[in-house]
Image (cartoon, rainbow, N blue to C red):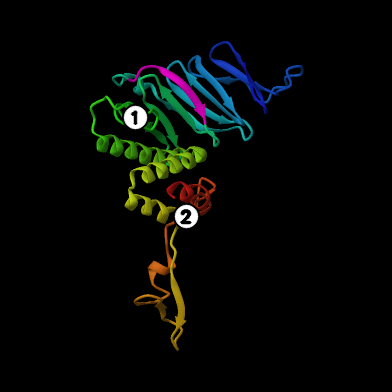
Protein backbone atom coordinates (compact mmCIF):
# COMPACT_ATOMS: atom_id res chain seq x y z
CA UNK A 1 0.00 0.00 0.00
CA UNK A 2 1.47 3.36 -1.05
CA UNK A 3 -0.04 6.33 0.80
CA UNK A 4 -0.17 9.71 -0.96
CA UNK A 5 -1.55 13.12 -0.11
CA UNK A 6 -4.47 12.78 -2.51
CA UNK A 7 -5.26 9.07 -2.44
CA UNK A 8 -4.12 5.71 -1.13
CA UNK A 9 -3.43 2.75 -3.40
CA UNK A 10 -4.56 -0.61 -2.16
CA UNK A 11 -3.20 -3.67 -3.85
CA UNK A 12 -4.98 -6.99 -3.78
CA UNK A 13 -4.32 -10.38 -5.30
CA UNK A 14 -1.34 -9.80 -7.57
CA UNK A 15 -3.10 -8.77 -10.78
CA UNK A 16 -5.73 -6.41 -9.36
CA UNK A 17 -5.90 -3.33 -7.17
CA UNK A 18 -8.13 -0.33 -6.51
CA UNK A 19 -7.70 3.22 -5.30
CA UNK A 20 -9.00 4.45 -1.98
CA UNK A 21 -9.15 7.81 -0.23
CA UNK A 22 -6.28 8.85 2.10
CA UNK A 23 -8.54 8.43 5.10
CA UNK A 24 -7.42 5.02 6.36
CA UNK A 25 -10.46 4.75 8.63
CA UNK A 26 -13.18 5.14 6.02
CA UNK A 27 -10.92 4.31 3.03
CA UNK A 28 -13.54 5.25 0.43
CA UNK A 29 -13.08 3.61 -2.96
CA UNK A 30 -12.08 6.10 -5.67
CA UNK A 31 -12.17 3.72 -8.64
CA UNK A 32 -13.33 0.27 -9.67
CA UNK A 33 -10.88 -2.58 -9.29
CA UNK A 34 -8.17 -2.31 -11.94
CA UNK A 35 -7.09 -5.57 -13.56
CA UNK A 36 -3.60 -5.95 -15.00
CA UNK A 37 -2.45 -8.51 -17.53
CA UNK A 38 0.20 -9.78 -15.09
CA UNK A 39 1.13 -9.20 -11.44
CA UNK A 40 2.48 -5.74 -10.63
CA UNK A 41 6.22 -5.58 -9.99
CA UNK A 42 6.09 -1.82 -9.31
CA UNK A 43 3.12 0.14 -7.98
CA UNK A 44 3.96 3.75 -7.24
CA UNK A 45 2.17 7.08 -6.99
CA UNK A 46 3.12 10.75 -7.05
CA UNK A 47 0.59 13.54 -6.74
CA UNK A 48 -2.40 12.51 -8.81
CA UNK A 49 -0.49 9.98 -10.95
CA UNK A 50 -0.26 6.24 -10.44
CA UNK A 51 2.42 4.07 -12.07
CA UNK A 52 2.11 0.31 -12.48
CA UNK A 53 4.77 -1.90 -14.09
CA UNK A 54 3.96 -5.57 -14.45
CA UNK A 55 6.33 -8.51 -14.18
CA UNK A 56 6.11 -8.82 -18.00
CA UNK A 57 7.33 -5.24 -18.54
CA UNK A 58 4.03 -3.51 -19.31
CA UNK A 59 3.91 0.11 -18.10
CA UNK A 60 0.69 1.96 -17.29
CA UNK A 61 0.26 5.42 -15.79
CA UNK A 62 -3.13 6.85 -14.86
CA UNK A 63 -4.30 10.30 -13.93
CA UNK A 64 -6.43 9.34 -10.94
CA UNK A 65 -8.38 12.60 -10.94
CA UNK A 66 -9.54 12.48 -14.55
CA UNK A 67 -9.45 8.65 -14.57
CA UNK A 68 -7.64 8.73 -17.91
CA UNK A 69 -4.42 6.97 -18.93
CA UNK A 70 -1.23 8.94 -19.47
CA UNK A 71 0.54 5.82 -20.72
CA UNK A 72 -1.55 2.84 -21.76
CA UNK A 73 0.09 -0.60 -21.81
CA UNK A 74 3.49 0.37 -23.22
CA UNK A 75 6.06 -2.40 -23.06
CA UNK A 76 9.67 -2.08 -21.92
CA UNK A 77 10.22 -5.84 -22.11
CA UNK A 78 12.61 -5.54 -25.07
CA UNK A 79 14.95 -3.36 -22.98
CA UNK A 80 15.79 -6.31 -20.76
CA UNK A 81 17.20 -8.20 -23.75
CA UNK A 82 19.87 -5.56 -24.37
CA UNK A 83 23.43 -6.35 -23.26
CA UNK A 84 24.51 -5.01 -19.87
CA UNK A 85 21.13 -3.40 -19.20
CA UNK A 86 20.84 -4.98 -15.77
CA UNK A 87 17.64 -4.84 -13.75
CA UNK A 88 15.14 -2.06 -13.14
CA UNK A 89 16.66 -0.40 -10.10
CA UNK A 90 14.73 2.85 -9.63
CA UNK A 91 11.45 4.40 -10.76
CA UNK A 92 10.34 8.02 -10.47
CA UNK A 93 7.50 10.18 -11.71
CA UNK A 94 8.31 13.78 -12.60
CA UNK A 95 6.02 16.74 -12.01
CA UNK A 96 3.85 16.07 -15.07
CA UNK A 97 3.51 12.37 -14.37
CA UNK A 98 6.10 11.15 -16.89
CA UNK A 99 8.13 8.16 -15.69
CA UNK A 100 11.89 7.95 -15.27
CA UNK A 101 13.12 4.35 -15.24
CA UNK A 102 16.71 3.69 -14.19
CA UNK A 103 18.46 0.36 -14.83
CA UNK A 104 21.34 -1.02 -12.80
CA UNK A 105 23.58 -1.13 -15.89
CA UNK A 106 23.51 2.68 -16.18
CA UNK A 107 20.77 3.24 -18.78
CA UNK A 108 17.82 5.50 -17.93
CA UNK A 109 14.59 5.69 -19.91
CA UNK A 110 12.05 8.49 -20.04
CA UNK A 111 8.70 8.79 -21.77
CA UNK A 112 8.29 11.36 -24.57
CA UNK A 113 4.67 12.44 -24.65
CA UNK A 114 5.20 14.15 -28.00
CA UNK A 115 6.70 11.08 -29.67
CA UNK A 116 4.63 8.62 -27.63
CA UNK A 117 7.64 6.40 -27.13
CA UNK A 118 10.49 5.67 -24.75
CA UNK A 119 13.70 7.70 -25.11
CA UNK A 120 17.08 7.19 -23.52
CA UNK A 121 17.95 10.08 -21.27
CA UNK A 122 21.11 8.49 -19.91
CA UNK A 123 23.48 5.99 -21.51
CA UNK A 124 25.80 3.73 -19.56
CA UNK A 125 28.80 4.74 -21.65
CA UNK A 126 28.55 8.38 -20.44
CA UNK A 127 30.11 7.10 -17.22
CA UNK A 128 33.28 6.21 -19.12
CA UNK A 129 34.26 9.84 -19.64
CA UNK A 130 31.63 12.35 -18.55
CA UNK A 131 32.09 14.31 -15.33
CA UNK A 132 28.39 15.21 -15.00
CA UNK A 133 27.55 12.71 -12.27
CA UNK A 134 30.98 12.31 -10.74
CA UNK A 135 34.21 14.16 -10.05
CA UNK A 136 36.84 14.12 -12.84
CA UNK A 137 39.16 11.15 -12.74
CA UNK A 138 42.69 12.41 -13.28
CA UNK A 139 44.18 8.92 -13.48
CA UNK A 140 41.92 7.42 -16.13
CA UNK A 141 44.36 8.27 -18.95
CA UNK A 142 41.85 10.25 -21.02
CA UNK A 143 42.90 13.71 -22.23
CA UNK A 144 41.18 16.65 -20.56
CA UNK A 145 39.82 17.86 -23.90
CA UNK A 146 38.15 14.49 -24.44
CA UNK A 147 36.52 14.53 -21.02
CA UNK A 148 35.37 18.12 -21.49
CA UNK A 149 33.81 17.38 -24.88
CA UNK A 150 32.06 14.29 -23.53
CA UNK A 151 30.80 16.14 -20.46
CA UNK A 152 29.35 18.99 -22.53
CA UNK A 153 27.79 16.48 -24.94
CA UNK A 154 26.27 14.66 -21.96
CA UNK A 155 24.75 17.89 -20.63
CA UNK A 156 23.40 18.88 -24.06
CA UNK A 157 21.77 15.46 -24.36
CA UNK A 158 20.27 15.79 -20.89
CA UNK A 159 18.86 19.24 -21.73
CA UNK A 160 17.16 17.86 -24.85
CA UNK A 161 15.90 14.79 -22.99
CA UNK A 162 14.47 16.91 -20.17
CA UNK A 163 12.40 18.84 -22.71
CA UNK A 164 11.22 15.62 -24.34
CA UNK A 165 10.07 14.00 -21.11
CA UNK A 166 8.61 17.22 -19.70
CA UNK A 167 10.84 17.59 -16.64
CA UNK A 168 11.03 21.34 -16.02
CA UNK A 169 13.18 21.26 -12.90
CA UNK A 170 15.70 18.91 -14.46
CA UNK A 171 15.84 21.16 -17.54
CA UNK A 172 16.44 24.25 -15.41
CA UNK A 173 19.16 22.61 -13.33
CA UNK A 174 20.94 21.13 -16.33
CA UNK A 175 20.92 24.43 -18.24
CA UNK A 176 22.57 26.16 -15.27
CA UNK A 177 25.09 23.33 -14.89
CA UNK A 178 25.83 23.55 -18.64
CA UNK A 179 26.42 27.30 -18.35
CA UNK A 180 28.78 26.74 -15.43
CA UNK A 181 30.82 24.22 -17.43
CA UNK A 182 31.00 26.58 -20.40
CA UNK A 183 32.30 29.35 -18.14
CA UNK A 184 34.89 27.06 -16.56
CA UNK A 185 36.19 25.96 -19.96
CA UNK A 186 35.80 29.43 -21.54
CA UNK A 187 33.71 28.12 -24.43
CA UNK A 188 32.53 31.54 -25.49
CA UNK A 189 30.82 30.54 -28.75
CA UNK A 190 28.63 27.95 -27.05
CA UNK A 191 27.93 30.39 -24.21
CA UNK A 192 26.73 32.96 -26.75
CA UNK A 193 24.51 30.33 -28.39
CA UNK A 194 22.97 29.53 -25.01
CA UNK A 195 22.35 33.23 -24.30
CA UNK A 196 20.70 33.72 -27.71
CA UNK A 197 18.44 30.71 -27.15
CA UNK A 198 17.31 31.95 -23.74
CA UNK A 199 17.06 35.64 -24.69
CA UNK A 200 15.17 35.02 -27.90
CA UNK A 201 15.05 37.31 -30.92
CA UNK A 202 16.15 40.81 -29.95
CA UNK A 203 16.03 43.37 -32.75
CA UNK A 204 18.19 46.39 -32.13
CA UNK A 205 16.45 48.69 -34.60
CA UNK A 206 15.81 52.38 -34.40
CA UNK A 207 12.35 52.91 -35.83
CA UNK A 208 12.94 55.53 -38.48
CA UNK A 209 10.10 55.44 -40.97
CA UNK A 210 10.22 56.68 -44.52
CA UNK A 211 7.36 58.68 -46.00
CA UNK A 212 5.67 55.40 -46.98
CA UNK A 213 6.09 54.08 -43.40
CA UNK A 214 7.33 50.82 -44.95
CA UNK A 215 11.07 51.06 -44.35
CA UNK A 216 12.77 50.64 -41.01
CA UNK A 217 16.40 51.68 -40.78
CA UNK A 218 18.87 49.56 -38.86
CA UNK A 219 20.67 51.75 -36.35
CA UNK A 220 24.02 50.41 -37.48
CA UNK A 221 24.10 49.36 -41.11
CA UNK A 222 21.25 48.60 -43.47
CA UNK A 223 17.54 48.85 -44.07
CA UNK A 224 14.86 46.27 -43.30
CA UNK A 225 11.27 45.92 -44.38
CA UNK A 226 9.17 45.43 -41.22
CA UNK A 227 6.99 42.95 -43.13
CA UNK A 228 9.92 40.69 -43.94
CA UNK A 229 9.65 37.14 -42.54
CA UNK A 230 12.69 37.47 -40.28
CA UNK A 231 11.03 40.35 -38.40
CA UNK A 232 7.48 39.00 -38.36
CA UNK A 233 8.00 35.32 -37.63
CA UNK A 234 10.08 33.25 -35.28
CA UNK A 235 9.82 29.75 -33.88
CA UNK A 236 11.30 30.84 -30.55
CA UNK A 237 9.17 30.21 -27.47
CA UNK A 238 9.57 32.44 -24.42
CA UNK A 239 9.01 29.58 -21.98
CA UNK A 240 10.10 25.98 -21.66
CA UNK A 241 7.92 23.67 -19.59
CA UNK A 242 6.38 26.69 -17.89
CA UNK A 243 9.75 28.29 -17.05
CA UNK A 244 10.54 31.74 -18.44
CA UNK A 245 13.73 31.51 -20.49
CA UNK A 246 14.58 35.18 -20.04
CA UNK A 247 14.08 35.01 -16.27
CA UNK A 248 16.29 31.92 -16.13
CA UNK A 249 18.93 33.74 -18.18
CA UNK A 250 18.82 36.87 -16.01
CA UNK A 251 18.65 35.27 -12.58
CA UNK A 252 20.67 32.06 -12.94
CA UNK A 253 22.61 31.71 -16.18
CA UNK A 254 24.25 35.15 -16.56
CA UNK A 255 25.53 35.16 -12.94
CA UNK A 256 27.14 31.78 -13.60
CA UNK A 257 28.70 32.91 -16.89
CA UNK A 258 30.09 35.98 -15.17
Quarter of the figure with the N terminus: top right
Characterize the local packing of mark 1: few (<14), some (14-19) or many (20 or more) Cα atoms within 10 angstroms: some
| Mark 1 secondary-structure assignment | loop
**Label 2's element?**
loop
Q: Eyeballing the image, is 254 above or below 226?
A: above
Q: Give residue 181's position: percent from left, percent from top.
A: 38, 41
Where is mark 2, residue-wise? 237
Q: Who is closer to the viewer here, 223 or 220?
A: 220
Residue 89, percent across and down?
44, 18
- In percent of width and height, residue 45 lies at 58, 25
Say which label, 2 or 1, has the lower sequence index.
1
- Relative to 243, does residue 36 appear above or below in the rendering? above
Which residues fall within the magenta stretch? Answer: 85-93
Q: Is disc 2 in contact with disc 1, using a CB cutoff of under 8 Å? A: no
- The quadrant holding residue 211 is bottom left
Give left or right: position of 19 versus 105.
right
Amino acid sequence: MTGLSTFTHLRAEGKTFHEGSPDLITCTRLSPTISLEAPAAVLKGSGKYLLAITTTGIVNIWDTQSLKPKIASSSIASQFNLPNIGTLSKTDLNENGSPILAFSGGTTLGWSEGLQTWVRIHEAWWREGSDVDSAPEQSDGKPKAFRTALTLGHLETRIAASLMVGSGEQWRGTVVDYARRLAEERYMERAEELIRELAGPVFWYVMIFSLSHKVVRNSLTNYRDPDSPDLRQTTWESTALGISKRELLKKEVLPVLG
